[in-house]
Amino acid sequence: MGSTQLERVDAEPIRKLLRSVSLNRAKDLDALFDEIDPACELDRGAERNLFQAVLGKPNIIRIGLQCTVRLEAHAHAAGVLFTAFGTPGFQTMDRDERNKLLSPADKILTWAVGLDLQRWLGQMGHDLNPEDVLPGGLSEMPTEIIGALTDNQRLFGRSFFLYASAFILLHELGHLKHGHTQSTHENEKVADRFAAEWMSDAASESGNEEFDRLAAIYGIAVALLWLTVFNFYFGKRESKTHPEGYDRLFQVLDQILDVPESDEYKMVWYFVAQMLFIHMWSAGFDFDPEQDAIHMQGDPRDEVNYYIDRISKWDKKREGQSS
Ligand SMILES: [Zn+2]
């Protein structure tokens, strides 16, 4: 099970973090914390994705520090990619120029995904190394890479990490609020909806509601893309407790992005489509320049749907090879 080093800490930093992104709901937030009165437990030893709500006296939100670092790395990689997508001429750039913009993200993703892979491969009893699945393997530490980012890339990375964390914490608070005693597909969806609904009218110190809402939706997308990483490499997880990562990603965004004509609809679905493509590419999915190109234009939500359909039909050929 790995070493367990639970450390009970004050939940006030969680309340502070959530308050900073939902200034307009300060009263609701206080009421929620008064009602649930959660304690926080940090687990430094656990390697798995550990965010957990435990109903009891007191109610507990358990957070794994190692997976939080992986989420932070994913958020910074998303920050790099986000700034690259927004670079004028990105769409028509030649491959070398594009790669130059994308390469810092590649390093961070390789590191973060490499750790995720190593853990899963161990769990599933494979003797494959992460570098057999992901070229590059485990090399550099993210601190060095993150230190080399531009201010803009880091700014977006931090924003994504903040809102991704807020979404995950609200998801756990949602479990406690609804009195969930176990994880089921239905309970996970309820907690996702609770968190997404809360975040959809985010308000920070920026004073710009439109901007804050958009930042929050990107953060949610980053959190759920992170939870989808398993699917890129191993296909369906078929967990009894949790819906597939890509299903959560699609359903939550579809709940929030409810106006197809809006800029945010186009921007976020476009971002998610690009992120899915990059992850699938890294994971070894083949893309046919003609066949796949048909799905890569038009409504970006359809494009996301197409990628998710392909991920869900992943044939687990790697598992077959390794036996
Ligand atoms: Zn949950």
Image (tube, rainbow, N blue to C red):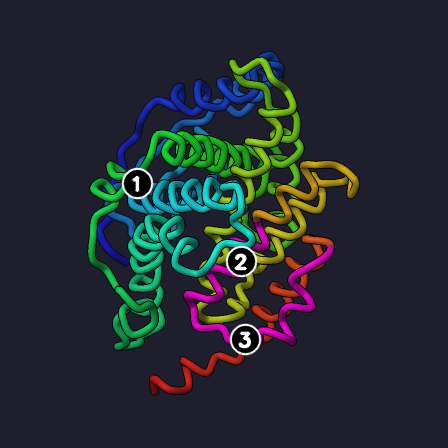
Identify residue for label 3.
314
Describe residue 245's horizontal placement relative to residue 234 as left or right: right
- Tell me the amino acid under the disc marked 1: Leu
- Tell me the amino acid under the disc marked 2: Leu
* Residue in front for this viewpoint, 132 or 14: 132
Dot 2 or dot 1: first in sequence order is 1
C-alpha distance separating marks 3 and 1: 31 Å
Residue 57 visible at all = no
Give the main secondary structure of the magenta stretch: helix
Is residue 44 shown above or below 317?
Answer: above
Looking at the rendered structure, the secondary structure element under dot 2 is helix
Do labels 3 and 1 touch, CB within 8 Å? Answer: no
Quarter of the image for the C terminus: give it.
Answer: bottom left
Residue 41, image x, y percentages: 34, 34
Residue 202 sits in quarter: top right
Residue 254 visible at all = yes
| Classed neighbour count for the residue bearing mark 3: other residues with Cα under 10 Å, few (<14), some (14–19), many (≥20) | some
Residue 257, image x, y percentages: 71, 40
Identify residue for label 2.
276
Judge depth for marks 2 and 1 and give the one in front: 2
Identify residue for label 1.
65
| Classed neighbour count for the residue bearing mark 1: other residues with Cα under 10 Å, few (<14), some (14–19), many (≥20) | some
Tell me, yes or no, whether the highlighted magenta stretch contains residue 289: yes
| Mark sitting on residue 36 | none
Residue visible at 34% across and 72% down? Answer: 133
